[in-house]
Amino acid sequence: MAELLAVRGLRVDFATDRGPAQVLDGMNLDIETGEVVGLVGESGCGKTTLARAILGILPEGAARIRAGEVRFKGTDLLREDPAAVNDRVRGRAITFIPQDPFTSFSPLFPIETQIMDLMKWKSPRAGNGGGPASILGRYPRARHRADREAALEILRAVQIPEPARALRRLPHEFSGGQRQRLMIAMALLPRPDLIIADEPTTALDVTIQAQILRLLRALVKERGVSVLFTTHDLGTAHEICDRVVVMYAGQEMEAAPTDAFFGRPAHPYTRRLLASVPSPGGEIRDIPGEVPSLVTPPSGCRFHPRCDYATAECRDVRPALRALAGAHGIRCHHPVDAPAGADP
């Protein structure tokens, strides 16, 4: 598969009353064409910040990109003209599925109005014989008809009953699961190369979560779309992802194909994270210690204050990427060789 997205050495600070918080510290990430990559880690580890940095929607004034690259199809988006990124990439080549389907729609307008407003500006037919929408609100009639038919088709694909009638309904007339299906439909409509899904099933009950995951997996594979799927739920990552990347305090720790990630984890943090999943008997094992402050983070590997294997080297030097078998990569001076499931 060909490389679609490559994040290299990305450093992002946020201004706080106590000084800049180093939310991303030299973060690296790769996504290939047609690949579903899971980005996992504890709350506050920087998953959403990374997603927003890729999209170019970090909060102005509060966030500052200090270094790094975000290469999409060979072009560094951080050095592109922002207007060009907004026109050609954001909302078109890269789309977004938000976390909460209950607050993602305006309650004032029918679903059709909100979908067609998206398509007016981001339709794949714009500039390709359908004519662009004008700043004065013109929406070429032929393209409007084609875009509406495409919307009906995608609503059928995400299993919304009676699509034509559904378009006339207001958001509150849909269940949470149906609203998330509508968000998936809107992310697919511009025919993107990459979808960023930011914990899209968190607000749903487990039965609906499973349905949404199966649907999303089937649709992206059918259309050859890549997905960056951020989640703190390891079960969800196991269900949908081809490869998993684990983050801790703004640094990537381990990246591996899903089977290797869950079957042969090598980083002490990954193993602690997997061990913290409740057992069938209800036992919960937490990770000793505390997540470090990002204003005054530890030097070297940020996990070293909580790691049983930490040495002076871990405290002083951030580990370089080490390649293991089968596209398995790890940043650790002392990878764990114990069998999966054993305590580190």
Image (tube, helix red, strand yellow):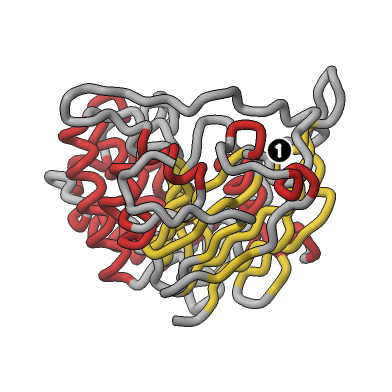
The location of residue 247, given as percent across then percent down, is 55, 45
Q: Nearer the viewer, residue 163 or 190?
A: 190
Query: Which residue is label 1 attached to?
Result: 23
Q: In the displayed orientation, state which residue is furthest to the top.
A: 17
70 or 10, which lies in front?
10
Q: Is residue 257 above or below residue 300?
A: below
| 131 or 106: nearer the viewer | 106
- Estimate the x, y position of residue 251 in percent, counting from the top left: 65, 47
Q: State the residue at coordinates (16%, 34%).
A: 207
- Residue drawn where x is 57% and y is 51% of the image: 253
Quarter of the rendering containing residue 150: bottom left
In this view, the residue farthest toward the left is 161
Label 1: element kind: strand
Q: Is residue 136 left or right of residue 40?
A: right
Which quadrant would the C terminus be assigned to in this image? top left
Q: Is residue 99 above or below residue 140?
A: above
Q: Nearer the viewer, residue 61 or 316?
A: 316
Residue 179 in view (yes/no): yes
Q: Which amino acid type corresponds to the residue marked 1 in the rendered image? A: Val
Residue visible at 60% across and 75% down? Answer: 73
Q: Is residue 88 visible?
A: no
Seen in the picture, residue 51 relative to 110 is either above or below; the reply is below
